[in-house]
Image (cartoon, grey):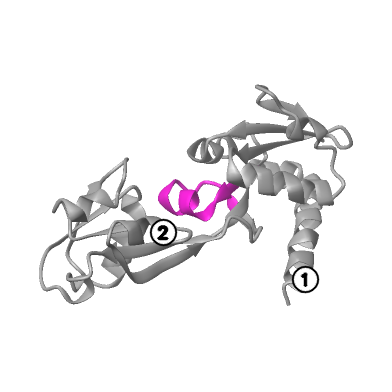
Amino acid sequence: MSLSVALTKGRLEKKTVAMLERCDYGIEKLKDKGRALVFPDTKKDIRYFLVKSNDCLTYVEHGVADIGVVGKDTILEGSKDYYEMLDLEIGKCKFILASLPDIDLLNKVGHIKIGTKYPNVARDYFHSKGMDVEIIKIDGSVELSPILGLCDGIVDIMETGTTLKENGLVVLDTVCPISARIIVNKASFKLKRQEVMNFLDDLKGIVEENAQSNL
């Protein structure tokens, strides 16, 4: 049976394609894609298509994609009607809690306001600490919100920390690490189990090779 694989556009796409190439998959059309969004594998019975991260969950949940590659940040914030099968150990970054240096946010008594693009992640984090929190959803530059007094701190993704430093914010805590994961449609895992497992095993081999080379 053929497989349909949804790849998250951008940085994860490039890293995933590099891993597939090391598995000797036929990803030539993905590397020279122009404006196309759907690509056949030239060596295997697989069809790839490129989507935004949130849409990756949707396509997998509805069975349009058997398999998806998406960041853990999207998984944590989104719905959960699929199997999370493999950590690819690429696209690594982390969710952090940050604030201005003069705000002792974690020891603040009473109600606090948190700005974030990820309200579910932020809410779960503060509830786990038993803290009274108001989540303010922000779609743009989250770092601006504590500077202008909209909130006491932010929960956001950090890769290098440069943007935080440039805006005078400090990291108070790591909420959780993030990396790219493979998710699988529940029906596909039953109906196409062997094909799905072959795909997973091939990529798992690359993950293990990477881990060995980093020792």
Residue drawn 57% across and 47% down?
70
> Where, quadrant-wise, is the N terminus in this rendering?
top right
Q: Earlier in the sequence, mark 2 or mark 1?
A: 2
Residue drawn 69% across and 24% down?
34
Residue 10 visible to an observer of this rendering? yes
Residues rendered magenta in the picture: 68-83
Question: Where in the figure is residue 40, as x and y percent of width and height?
Answer: 79, 29
Question: Where in the figure is residue 88, as x and y percent of width and height?
Answer: 66, 58
Q: Is residue 157 left or right of residue 104?
A: right
Magenta highlight on residue 70: yes
Local packing at callout 2 (Cα closer than 10 Å; few below 14, some 14-19, many 20+) is: few
Q: Closer to the camera: disc 2 or disc 1? A: 2
Q: Is residue 185 left or right of residue 152?
A: right
Question: Where in the figure is residue 52, as x and y percent of width and height?
Answer: 53, 35
The numbered mark at residue 52 is none
Residue drawn 56% across and 60% down?
92
The type of residue carrying mark 1 is Ser
Q: In this picture, is 177 found above or below 201?
A: below
Badge 2 is on which residue?
162
The type of residue carrying mark 2 is Thr
Q: How many marks?
A: 2
- Closer-to-camera residue (192/119): 119
Quarter of the rendering containing residue 167 = bottom left
Q: Dot 2 lies on which element?
A: helix
Local packing at callout 1 (Cα closer than 10 Å; few below 14, some 14-19, many 20+) is: few
The numbered mark at residue 213 is 1
- Closer-to-camera residue (167/172): 167
Residue 185 visible to an observer of this rendering? no
Residue drawn 77% across and 52% down?
197
Label 2 vs label 1: CA separation? 28 Å
Q: In this picture, is 196 found above or below 173?
A: above
